[in-house]
Amino acid sequence: MASIYEKKFVSGDPAKCVGCCVCEYACSMHHEKTYNPTKSRIRAVRLNPFVNLAVACRLCEDAPCVAACPRDALEQSQETGIIIVDEDKCNGCGWCIEACDYGAIQLHPESKVVYICDLCDGEPKCVEWCPEEALDFTTKDILAQKSRVAIVKKMFQEALKATT
Amino acid sequence: MSYAKRILHVDLTTGKTKIEPLKEDIAKKYIGGIGLGMRLFLDNSKPGTDPLSPENPIIFATGPLSGTMAPSAGNSYAVVSKSPLTGGIAESKAHGFFGAEIKRAGYDAIIFTGKSEKLVYILIDDDSVQLMDAEYLKGKSPHDTEIAIREDLGDFYIRVSAIGEAGEKLVRIASIINDEFRAIGRTGMGAVMGSKNLKAVAVRGTNDVNVGNLEEFTEFIKMIHERMKGPATRKYRTLGTPENVLVLNSLAALPTRNFTQVTFEGAEKVSGEYLNERYVKKIIGCATCGMRCDHIGVVPEGPYKGATARVEFECLWALGPNCGVDRLDAIIEAIYQCDYYGMDGISAGVIVSFAMDCYENGILTKKDTDNLDLHFGNAEALVEMVKRMGSRKGWLGEVLAEGTMRAAEKIGKGAVKYANHIKGLELPGYALRTLKTAALGFAVSFRGACHLRSGAYSPDVKGKVDRFKIEKGRGKLVMDGEDLYNVVDSLILCKFSRGVFFEGLEEMAKYYTLTTGIAMTAEELRQAGERINNLARVLNIREGQGTREYDTLPPKIMSVPVPDEGIAKGAVVNQKEFDIGLDDYYEIRGWTKEGIPTVEKLKELGLSDLVPIVKKKLGPQTPKKKGKGGK
């Protein structure tokens, strides 16, 4: 298997997410030892009762945040795909925040440098705590498989019923 | 320490603010939520204040768990003031997202006094507190207000708690609504906000909320999360509280047509089962909570197509069976209208049913209703009447906007016979002639008719007692329920989650200790619950109420036998058994026969400073005899 498919990240399922923010609290608890969603690396968005989704870093290939940093403070791990912040180089200018289409990069209110999902050393706490099992720690390959299987199931539900 | 240790005072007349520290002993004694709120109310108000005058403070209080990851409690706040509906002490709680934001902004409570010259909203951004122009928000629904403020300030994460047109127009059953569907519903707190020209409270908080022992706290809430996935919360996660419709109907305990009958022939069509199959589009939840209880109903077709509301049993019942209405589309529309104008759905339904009862009995005519056919079961008339009440439109709209008690006086002609309220607060959906522990509990509740002050319907519904009579022993059931619920409402735990505390107060005390870092035992917590009930009682006494003659039941419950054929036929609460219940309750509470807390009781609970208030009422009795004041 090509190495790209081994990179796992946190992905929210809009069909399951209810916008409860438990992920935000779990994240700040793990990383910051406090409860404060404004310091969470994953943020939930509720547009209305029916449209909810939690969003974190998606490990873009050729990550635009890395390219946008004028001070070379961001580096993408070859191995895991996470974005590593060199806190000595980062001066909080926010170019990377602007470059990220997903709002997954934020400026830390105290350290004044940016912070990004680091996947909790391979065991993301948000995934562990999500009461709806709406967060997956998964690869893009598996996500594609899931969607593919789901759509085929939907298209051929009659045929499925007839054969099982 | 999960308390912010700060109380914010806002004088809306001058725009001045100040910060007062929250002392640790007060925090422990009154916990937070309604307990802390009522203590602050006592300390910041004068007796006999008109509820709609600038002098009446309105207090937003968080709980010790607010702002933490505590499931069902990390998201909550309570509002305390003097009720424009009852004239007594008032409190209400709401969950959602808003409450946590107050704590994160760095406050345990906010006390609003005075009155702004123009309509304003208050913007609290951590330490910065500003009054903002709200004239452009006039007449907007609470939810539209929330959207407008967020857009104006360009901040998606601002949380807003607001009133609608009903609150602005001082409708006495006006609510305060946050996060679209979550209401400070009962006792008319929205009207108090309206009387201050305060349209909304908008908060953005960015501070940390820390707990006493992070490791053990985390373990504890992990356990609660797991339990929430189990049987203790099954009802709320599946059919939701509308499950009650068929349960109560089968027990002959579903009040129908303004408490005339106790069964509803249309129950199936408004049942939780029917609702979930046809109307519930998604079940969502509040911040930090692992339980999913918000059943969001959407009308898919017909005249009310698109109407969206969170549907719980109480509002469904009040605007449905209680008005003889068996159409869920109209019920969802009526709940939506209550949310839109910002009104308590329970009170709104019971007021409309009162008007329908008057209409059926010839006390109101088409002349009074501006040609509206107010027969029971007329769904269109129900929706129209809710709108008129919310906007004080027409003569009847104006009259009903004052609440059942005042409307009955105004209408006259014997309308009081059909007025279903206790202390001025409309009855919720339990038939008190066939659930008599509930009858006693509702009668003595300090905020007026309420199923959530003691949960006294529970032993009746579960068959733990003979629900067709009141006898000795019921007083203790009510008292224990009240003291527990005072704790729940001061920690501001969601009542839907009460079943996950297998060890009751023991676990709640542990929860408190782990969160705040302040040691608390189960007995201390129980006593805090008792203290809070006595405080509330004394506050009512201070306002000229709170004694035996105010612990009443509506005429229909006391004098009209149940007409339905079957097990309940002929049931009524008679004066004799009711008196037995009151005597029993006052005695177990350590109060006098008149229902006044004794000096000894107040001292025992650390409420010595309240003694002068009751002394006036107790009169020249001999306080030497222990345990007995009064007559």
Image (tube, grey):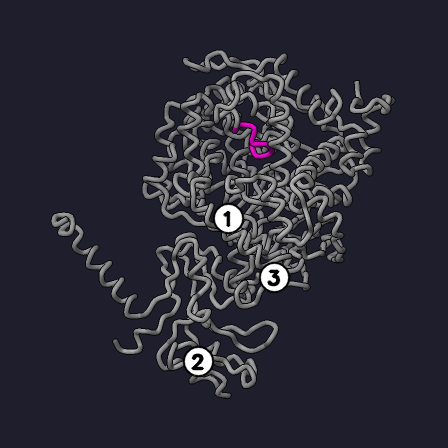
Q: Nearer the viewer, residue B379 or B467?
A: B467
Q: In the rendered image, which residue does mark 1 sit on?
A: B224
Magenta highlight: main SS: loop
Q: Which residues are drawn in magenta?
A: B451-458
Q: What's the mark number on residue A65?
A: 2
Check the residue under mark 1 and report the chain it is in: B
Q: CA distance from mark 1 to mark 3?
A: 26 Å
Q: Quadrant of residue B69?
A: bottom right
Q: Split into 4 quadrants, where in the image is the N terminus of chain A?
A: bottom left
Looking at the picture, which amino acid does disc 1 mark?
A: Ile
Residue B552 location, quadrant? top right
Question: Residue B284: percent from the left, percent from the top?
Answer: 43, 49
Q: Secondary structure at mark 3?
A: loop
| Secondary structure category for the residue under label 1 | helix
- Residue under pointer 3: B205
Q: Position of residue B501 (x, y in %)?
A: 54, 42
Does residue B610 appear to the left or right of B123 in the view shown? right
Residue drawn at (60%, 41%) of the image: B506
Count of numbered labels shown in the rendering: 3
Quadrant housing residue A127: bottom left
> Observer-nearest residue: B57 or A21?
A21
